Amino acid sequence: THSTHYSTTIRKHLNTVASRETMSAELTEPDRDGCLRGIIPFTYLADGKRKEVEEKLRFHAFEPGEVVLRASCSDDVSQSNNTCDVSAFRIFVCIEGGFVCTDDNGCVAADDVILPGSYFGERSAIFRTARGDDIRAIRDGPSSAWSLESQELVALLKEHNPRFALALASDLRHTQGIFDAFLAFHAFAFSAFHEPTDRPLDFSGLIERYRLLKPALHPHINKNHLVDYGAWSYALRRLPDNITRSYNIVCSRRVINVLNVSNGNGDKTSHLADFTSSITGPGSSIQTDARRRTVWEVMPGKLFILLRELQGDYLDFITCLCIHSIEMKKLWQRLRPIPVVAKHLADGLEVINSGVSKEEAAKVTADTLAKICKGRLQERDQEQLILLWPKKDTLRRLLDIAIHHADYTVYLDKRGNSHAGSGDEHWCRRVRETAVQLIGEFDNASDSNLVVDIVSSNTHSVLNCISPYIHSHKSEIMAWGKENMPELFECGLNNEMDMMYPIVKAYFKCHPEGEQLAKKINQKWGIKSVLEREFTGVDVQLFDLNKVSEEGRKY
C-alpha cells in the first residue's frame, strides 16, 4: 500500500488516459456489437454465442473515485445512476477511463491500472468469494464499464467450451494467483524436510498459512466466537484417538525399530519379516476412526505416525491437525478461567470413573456441562461437544483441552538412503500372488484374456452382496438381528437386505466361528482377501467371477 493516492507509475498512465479527447464528464454507451471479440477469454466463444453474451451486458458510468467493488463484498457500487445490483456478483469489462485497487483509506494498493479492454471481478463472480481490496474508478475523470452477472459467466463455463474455460483458468492461476495460498502452505508444510538440521515444523507459522487457504471444509475458520463443530468433527475422526493428550508428533515413512508393530486392529503381527526387522519395544497402537493411519504412542504425549507417502497422506494429516488446533483454541478461550472449569470437570470425572451406569454417566456429563457452559457456552455447544466425544469421554476430553492449549510440536523425519523394498512393492507382490492362487499363473504383459474390474469400496459392501455364506444364512442372521438389534427394524428401511448387511458385522462379532466358516466358503467360491501388512492402509478383496457364477448359482 502506498502512502499517497497514486504512485509515479500510475500517474503516468492516468495522465495518458485523462488526455484522451473522448473522455468527457458524461459517458454514453458505445455500440455493443463485437465489443467482446478481442477480449480473452470471450474471443474463444463462437460468434453466435458471443453475440448472445454481448446482449446481456449491462452498462455503468462511474464518477471519478467512485467505488465499484468493495473488499469483503460481492458488488457494492455507490448508490448513483446506473449502479449495479448490490446483491449480484459480476465480472466487469472496462470501456473508458480506468479502475484501480485501493485499500480502506482509498490509497492505491497495487501499481496496476485496469485499462479499456481489461476485465476484473471474475474471481468473486465465479467463486462468490470476498475481495481483498476495493475497486474504484480513477480520480482523473469519469470511467465506464460493462458487467455480466455471475450466473451468466458460470453458465458459459458449464457449456464445456474448453478453449474459453482454459483461457479463464489461466487468468485465475497466473494473474489472480488462485493457487498461491495452497502453494505457500505446501512449501511451508515441507520446509522442515529440507532443513539441514532436525528442527521441528513451525506449527504456528503453518496455522497462519492454513488460514489463508480459506478452506470450504472450514467455513468458520476466522470466527473466533463460533466453534466450527462440522469441520472439527471431520478432522477428529481422521486424527489419532488420543490427539487431545498428545503434544509431540513424529511423521515418517520409516518404521523405527523401537515399536511393537500392530496391524491397526490392536493385534500384533509378525508379517513384516521381509519388510522391516527387529521391530520390538514399548509402542502401542492408536486408532484413527475414519482414516487408515498407522499410529503408535511411543510414550505418553508422543506419537509416531507412519506415512504411506509424503504427499497426500502427510498433507491430509497436517491439515486436519490445523483444523483441530484452531477449533481447540477457540474452545479453550471460552472455557476460561481454566482453574474453575477444571475443578468442575475433575469432579464430574471422579463420579463417572467410580463405576456408575451408562445412564448415570450421561446425566453427570450433562450436569457438569451445564455448570461450565453457564455464561461461557450455549446449549448448542453442549450438544455438539457430546456428539464430538460420545460415550463417557466428553469430560475427559474437555479437561485435556483445558490443560493442552493446542501446543503441538511436529517433526517430519528425513528419510535416509534405504536399499530395502518399499511397502508398496511388497503389497503389489502379495496381491499378484493371491490372484495366481485364484486363477492360475498369467503373463502381466501379454495375457489379453485377463479382464480386471476395480471397485473402490470399503471392505464389506461388495463382499456382503456376493458372499454365499451370508445369503445362505440369511434367516438365521435376520432372526439374531431382530432379537439383538431391534432399533434397526424401526428405522424405516424397506429392503430387508439393507437391514441384513449392517447386522452381519455385529453377528460375526458374537459368532466368530461363523466368520471363520464364511471365509472358508468364500475361498471355495473364488473370494480371497489380502490384508495389508506393509502399512499401505489398503486391504484388497479378490473375486474370481468365473467361480462365483459357476453353474449359474444365485443367492
Image (cartoon, rainbow, N blue to C red):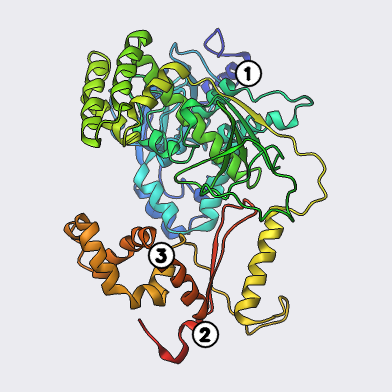
Residue at the spot of label 1? 9
Residue at the spot of label 3? 461
Q: Amino acid at mark 1?
A: Thr
Q: If you read the primary sequence from the N terminus, does the residue marked by circle 2 or circle 1 appear first?
A: 1
Q: Is residue 76 visible?
A: no
Q: Quadrant of residue 324?
A: top left
Q: If you read the primary sequence from the N terminus, does the residue marked by circle 1 or circle 3 appear first?
A: 1
Tell me what residue is drawn at x 60 percent, y 40 percent: 314
Separation of disc 2 and disc 3 at Cα? Answer: 20 Å
Residue 516, image x, y percentages: 46, 68
Q: Is residue 443 above or below residue 332?
A: below
Give the secondary structure at mark 2: helix
Quick check: marks 2 and 3 in contact, CB under 8 Å?
no
Separation of disc 1 and disc 3 at Cα? Answer: 65 Å
Q: Quadrant of residue 233?
A: top left
Q: Is residue 417 above or below residue 103?
A: below
Q: If you read the primary sequence from the N terminus, does the residue marked by circle 2 or circle 3 appear first?
A: 3
Residue at the spot of label 2? 546
Residue 15, image x, y percentages: 57, 18
Residue 32, image x, y percentages: 40, 45
